[in-house]
Each structure stands twice: as structure tokens, then as C-alpha cells.
Amino acid sequence: MGNRPGGSACPPYSGRVPLGPDPVRARAVAGHLDALAATVGEAEDDVLGCLVVTGEPRPQRVLDDWLDQVVDTLRALGETAADLAPVLARHELGPADGVGAGAPDADVAARAREVDR
């Protein structure tokens, strides 16, 4: 036990405060992020596929700029989802499903290898 500045001893860990993210929740969030990345990729293709030609230079520029902003936003969402996946992979392995006891599923193992790179 550690001592506080006043000399009193700190109580031991109570067991009520988690020491890290819940692996089940990390896997759920990773699944949602994977789905988001796939959906955003399809939406980006759909937006790029619906480019309209107005025939007027000024409205065309406004429309093109707006569609560019939409596509840029979708790309940013997809990139952020992809960037977060390796971070979450560190927390997907919990004591109950792979750390020292049995093998984790293939998806979790692949993410863990990606984090180690």
C-alpha cells in the first residue's frame, strides 16, 4: 500500500473501477466502424456517380463545389474509421478470450497483428 502525503495509507484497489476498455465493447465499436467505413465508401461512389451537368457555369461551379465537400466529408469519415480500428484492436483481446487462454477469432488476431506493425 502506498502512503498519502499526510502519512495515511491508501486503500487497495476496490475492483469497481475498470483498468481498461471492455473487450466486448471494443469489438462492438470496431464492428460498427468497419460497417461505417464500408457504407461511407459506397456513399462516396454514389455521390460521384450522380454528377449533374447544369449547362450554366455559375450554378455548375456551386453544385460541383458542394458535391466535392460531400465527398471530402465522406472520405474523412472513412479515413477516421480506418485510423481508429488499429487503436481499438489493442483492446479487443481480453483475459476471457485470448490472452493466455485459447486463440482469439481470426478477425481480432488480424487486427492485433496490424497494431504490432
Image (cartoon, rainbow, N blue to C red):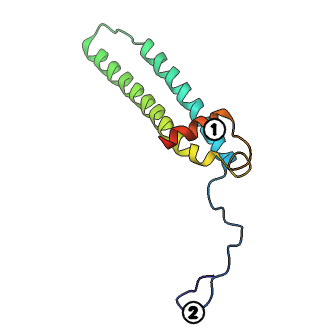
Residue visible at 57% across and 41% down in the picture: 112
- Tag 1: amino acid: Val
* Figure check: 52 above or below 3: above
SS of the residue under disc 1: helix
Q: Residues within 10 Å of mark 1 (few under 14, many from 20)?
A: many
Return the mark for residue 77.
none
For the N terminus, the image quarter is bottom right
Query: For this view, does 22 lie left or right of residue 44?
Result: right
Near-viewer residue (54 or 18): 18
Near-viewer residue (14 or 57): 14
Reading the image, the residue beneath label 2 is 7
Residue visible at 47% across and 17% down in the picture: 45
How far from the left and from the top, in percent, is residue 5? 52, 89
Query: For this view, does 86 lie left or right of residue 27?
Result: left
Near-viewer residue (20 or 104): 104
Picture quarter containing residue 36? top right
How far from the left and from the top, in percent, is residue 51? 40, 12
Return the mark for residue 108.
1
- Tag 2: amino acid: Gly
How far from the left and from the top, in percent, is residue 44? 46, 22
